[in-house]
């Protein structure tokens, strides 16, 4: 029965993991992440939670910028919308299981509103419009005292989910971990299906996309919505993690950091967010150690080392843009292709 | 039924500032016909296709498809009506694989939305598998591109890119296909292949085709009907044999003493 056979072939072909090897690695990685708190210190668990949150946020930004080609410099503001929505809802007595998706939905809604300029604007002009979103949202957070606590910020009540209480760092870590994995699966699924193809089509050639019948504006907005939904979820988690939120956690500085992470990891690669965030946090830790050592070694020159982090990160971003514009994900792909053929690498 | 008009163009005029790109063009495409549009550079051939596929809005005149006026529909709505096209300067999605490019051709006819895409289950998975099967068995086979279907389009040679663009248009299951210089820049063998594909699509799938092409040999060999443009005006129209003899065409397009000869 050749027809049935064909069917099976295509089904195999459309699967996510082509080889057992990849699958095995992935399972090993997931188990390592799940078991990590057993050996990791409290500090490490905190850091890993931050990593997970950043991964979710970066996946969102990658959908918007990497896959749909719309640069956003306001991503942190959408994270903020999620953070405040979730915290305010919990404060009003809503259960966490409602507040969390509402944070995503609210951010998605706000994201779509600020995505409307994409009807007319593209590229850098759209990026400027997203800066406007950043400032408007930040301004609203600062000034709407009765709702957000204004410049003083607000305390976040810990969410509970059945037997779990997320003021417990370990449980928050697991929640973040599960959501980060889910976010990765979701982005992979979107990218290999109809909507994701439409996103990439718009990025590559929006006129041709229109000719094959893609409603460009609709998908641009949808991309804003999906991206901001991720941001909102990340924001809700970040609020739980920080315990006190102010507008300072969601500045344009943070937006740029997210964008930099995506660039380093690989815009338009499903795993780009993960590589980028991983690289970023590792570099941050290394620089932390270096700075403290320098400070103790040369206590007279402390002022010299304060901005070491900013300088190094600036250089790293520039170097990536020049030498590795496709990010670590692409580099990893070439390395893998090389080893597959090794030692016959010609 | 055979002599039914599928596309009618009525008195179409399009200007860019001072340039009159199209000037009162009227022509038609019969159902199942392969009709060619020829003319010197800048005659307005691409503009005419762009008006049909709604990239440009003419200042005057109408485009009628199956009896309906489509002159003012939004661009993305045209695909759904069954009008597909290829471009003079290839407009493929360069970062994607050949297969994904072709799949995109089917975009408007798929129903899965973002929510079922997110879980990649149910409707999405059924549609994706059906689509894949159809593309593999109908289009990839027909255009002989099995070997490159997993490759990223941007890395392919020009001739193959042209073929992939045709494949993407075919994935739209079009009733009308607008081809803008599908053989431009190809060598003899590639031109022959492409001519064969176009004829197959026309006869086997029953697709009506408008072909814009400079290669007179190909045009005269494969088309049923030829329309000649010059400086935005239609100067002649009719069966290829008549066009070859038309004095104005010979003067305008072929040059005084140049004979038509086939490269095929
Ligand atoms: N977007 C545009 N803006 C201004 N002028 C245009 C535009 N598009 C086409 N034109 C002009 O309209 C005229 C017709 O162009 P068109 O592209 O239709 O020619 P063509 O017959 O396809 O020629 P070729 O054989 O070179 O492809 C040309 O003079 C061209 O410069
Ligand atoms: Mg042209």
Image: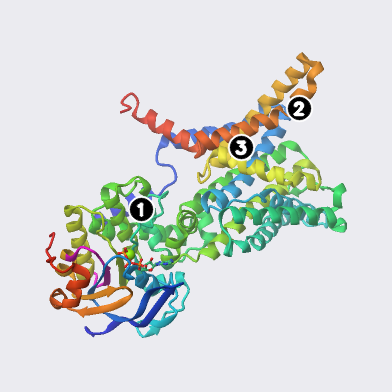
Q: Is residue A337 above or below residue A228?
A: above
Q: Which residue is more in the foreground, A224 or A260?
A: A260
Residue drawn at x 78%, y 16% is: A296
What is the magenta range? B205-216
Disc 1 to disc 2, C-alpha distance: 51 Å
- Please tell me whether mark 3 or mark 2 is closer to you in this view: 2
Residue drawn at x 18%, y 66% is: B216
SS for callout 2: loop
Residue ID for mark 1: B99
Q: For mark 2, does the 10 Å Cα neighbourhood hold few (<14), some (14 to 19), or many (20 or more) residues?
A: few
- Please state if A284 lies on the left or on the right of A303 as rendered: left
SS for callout 3: helix
Disc 3 to disc 2, C-alpha distance: 22 Å
Q: Chain of mark 2?
A: A
Residue ID for mark 2: A306
Residue drawn at x 42%, y 82% is: B60
Q: Assess whether residue B86 is covered by the magenta stretch.
A: no
Residue B88 % position (x, y): 33, 61
């Amino acid at each position: 029965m050749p027809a049935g056979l064909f069917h099976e072939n295509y089904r195999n072909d459309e699967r996510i993991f082509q080889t057992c090897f990849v699958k095995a690695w992935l399972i090993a990685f997931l188990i390592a992440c799940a078991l990590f708190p057993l050996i990791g210190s409290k500090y490490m668990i905190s850091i890993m939670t931050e990593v997970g949150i950043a991964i979710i946020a970066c996946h969102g930004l990658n959908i918007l910028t990497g896959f749909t080609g719309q640069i956003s410099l306001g991503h942190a503001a959408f994270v903020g919308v999620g953070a405040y929505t979730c915290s305010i809802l919990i404060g009003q007595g809503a259960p966490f299981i409602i507040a969390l998706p509402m944070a995503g939905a609210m951010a998605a809604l706000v994201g779509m509103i600020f995505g409307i300029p994409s009807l007319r604007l593209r590229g850098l002009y759209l990026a400027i419009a997203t800066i406007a979103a950043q400032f408007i949202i930040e301004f609203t957070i600062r000034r709407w005292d009765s709702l957000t606590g204004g410049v003083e910020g607000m305390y976040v009540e810990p969410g509970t989910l059945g037997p779990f209480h997320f003021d417990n760092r370990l449980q928050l870590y697991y929640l973040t971990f599960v959501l980060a994995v889910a976010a990765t699966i979701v982005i992979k699924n979107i990218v290999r299906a109809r909507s994701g193809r439409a996103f990439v089509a718009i990025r590559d050639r929006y006129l041709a996309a229109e000719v094959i019948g893609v409603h460009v504006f609709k998908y641009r907005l949808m991309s804003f919505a999906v991206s901001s939904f991720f941001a909102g979820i990340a924001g809700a988690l970040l609020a739980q993690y920080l315990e006190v939120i102010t507008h300072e956690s969601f500045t344009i500085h943070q937006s740029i950091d997210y964008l930099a992470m995506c660039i380093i990891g690989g815009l338009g690669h499903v795993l780009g967010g993960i590589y980028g965030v991983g690289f970023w946090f590792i570099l941050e830790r290394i620089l932390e150690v270096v700075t403290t050592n320098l400070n103790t070694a040369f206590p007279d020159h402390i002022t010299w080392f304060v901005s070491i982090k900013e300088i190094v990160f600036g250089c790293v971003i520039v170097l990536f843009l020049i030498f590795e514009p496709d990010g670590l994900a692409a580099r990893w792909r070439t390395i893998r292709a090389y080893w597959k053929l090794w030692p016959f690498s010609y | 039924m055979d002599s039914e008009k599928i596309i009618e163009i009525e008195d179409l005029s399009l200007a860019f500032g001072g340039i009159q790109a199209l000037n009162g063009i009227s022509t038609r495409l019969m159902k199942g016909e392969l009709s060619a549009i020829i003319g010197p550079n800048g005659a307005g051939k691409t503009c005419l296709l762009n008006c049909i596929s709604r990239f440009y809005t003419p200042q005057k005149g109408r485009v009628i498809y199956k009896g309906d006026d489509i002159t003012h529909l939004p661009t993305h709505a045209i695909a759904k009506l069954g009008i597909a096209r290829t471009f003079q300067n290839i407009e493929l999605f360069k970062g994607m694989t050949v297969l994904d490019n072709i799949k995109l051709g089917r975009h408007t006819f798929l129903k899965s939305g973002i929510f079922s895409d997110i879980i990649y289950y149910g409707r999405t998975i059924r549609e994706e598998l059906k689509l894949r099967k159809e593309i593999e068995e109908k289009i990839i086979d027909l255009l002989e591109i099995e070997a490159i279907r997993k490759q990223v389009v941007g890395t392919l040679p020009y001739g193959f890119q042209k073929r992939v663009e045709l494949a993407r248009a075919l994935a739209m299951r079009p009733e009308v296909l607008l081809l803008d210089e599908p053989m431009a820049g190809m060598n003899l063998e590639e031109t022959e292949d492409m001519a064969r594909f176009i004829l197959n699509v026309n006869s086997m799938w029953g697709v009506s085709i408008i072909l814009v092409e400079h290669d007179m040999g190909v045009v005269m060999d494969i088309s049923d009907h030829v329309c000649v443009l010059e400086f935005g005006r239609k100067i002649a129209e009719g069966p290829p044999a008549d066009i070859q003899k038309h004095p104005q065409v010979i003067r305008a397009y072929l040059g005084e003493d140049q004979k038509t000869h086939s490269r095929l």
